[in-house]
Amino acid sequence: MSDFAAWSRAVQARMETALDRILPAASLAPERLHAAMRYVALGGGKRVRPMLAFAAGEAVEAPADAVEAAACAVELIHVFSLTHDDLPCMDDDDLRRGKPTCHVQFDEATALLVGDALQSQAFEVLARPGGNAATQVDMLALLARSSGSRGMCGGQAVDLYSTGRSLELAELEFMHIHKTGALIQASVLLGAMAGGPLDPAVRTGLERYARCVGLAFQVMDDVLDAETDTATLGKTAGKDAAQGKATYLTLMSAREARDYANDLVAEAESALAPFAAAGRRLAEIARFIVARRY
């Protein structure tokens, strides 16, 4: 995995440079808003979604610069969602990526505007000139659908409405396929679509892979929230149980959850069979997701 570790660090460094270039300078009016946008988007995070975009781009030999734009777009949407999730009206958290959350560092109104602005910035990045216009429109539609009420925002709504309730596994997975999985699937598909229209069989394989990886990611998030300390996580540990959230650990033991995550990774890897060696990075990311400690 040492080669994967070096590759992931390279992607993280590339994303830091790209986001630094894309985001408005803190000296540009309105300075406080731009400073807050940079505060939440730069200098932290695993960048799993950009890694997925670059890995999918490699699998279909998409141009790296085009993939970078897609990766930036999904990361900006992700950071927007984290900023809003941490607000007192949502999950009410004080710590994210090892530092005070946006509404704590700045204020609630600024945090709300930061999320709005990052969401707009994501679509601006993805709408850059050049490339296949029809594919670009498809990519914009995919990102919108994945981040809206039929995707990430819808999943967050279900999460909020379900607090304090017991959910069956099918209900829990419906929530996570939308809340976490939709943007993970968008990361994979957008990275591949950066190379042009996708063959239907290729798209089907990538969708199956992404669905499994998205669920495995959430399973491990639930396990780590219960088993790992706040300093390691970079966010408040034990928050799910304290808030009465429905999680995989309300339905199964931690060992069973880890086994389930490994089963999902095995299914994700099987979906990559048609890609052969070209799907190597996607397979490595799937294994990283279940092995991670934060």
Image: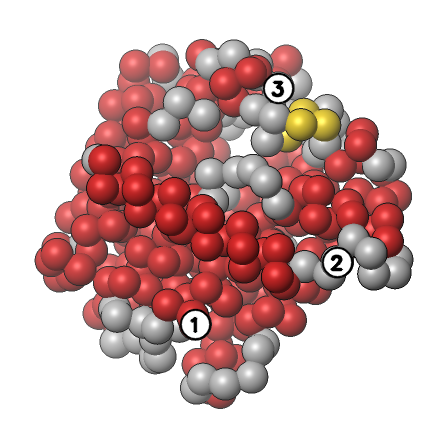
Query: Is the Cβ of the residue at disc 3 closer than 8 Å to that at disc 2?
Result: no
Mark in the foreground, 1 or 2: 2
In three-dimensional space, the C-alpha distance between marks 1 and 2, rounded to whole angstroms, equals 23 Å
Q: Position of residue 283 (x, y in %)?
A: 22, 46
Image quarter where the N terminus lies is: top left
In three-dimensional space, the C-alpha distance between marks 3 and 2, rounded to whole angstroms, equals 30 Å
Query: What residue is drawn where x is 59% and y is 69%?
Result: 125
| Circle 1: residue type | Ala
Q: Taking 175 as reference, is 139 above or below it?
A: below
Label 1 secondary element = helix
| Circle 2: residue type | Ala
Residue 138 located left or right of residue 2: right
Q: Position of residue 51 (x, y in %)?
A: 39, 50
Q: Position of residue 183 (x, y in %)?
A: 49, 52
Query: What residue is drawn where x is 38% and y is 43%?
Result: 9
Counting residues from the start of the chain, the first of labels 3 and 2 encountered is 2
Residue 68 located left or right of residue 292: right
Query: What residue is drawn where x is 41% and y is 66%?
Result: 67
Q: Is residue 36 visible in this depiction of the protein?
A: yes
Counting residues from the start of the chain, the first of labels 1 and 2 encountered is 2
Nearer to the camera, 87 or 165:
87
In three-dimensional space, the C-alpha distance between marks 1 and 3, rounded to whole angstroms, equals 35 Å
| Circle 3: residue type | Thr
Identify residue for label 3: 236
Identify residue for label 2: 25
Label 2 secondary element = loop
Q: Residue 66 shows which numbered tag?
A: 1
Label 3 secondary element = loop
Q: Is residue 265 visible in this depiction of the protein?
A: no
Label 3 environment density (alpha carbons within 10 Å; few <14, some 14–19, many ≥20)? some
Q: Taking 143 as reference, is 104 above or below it?
A: above
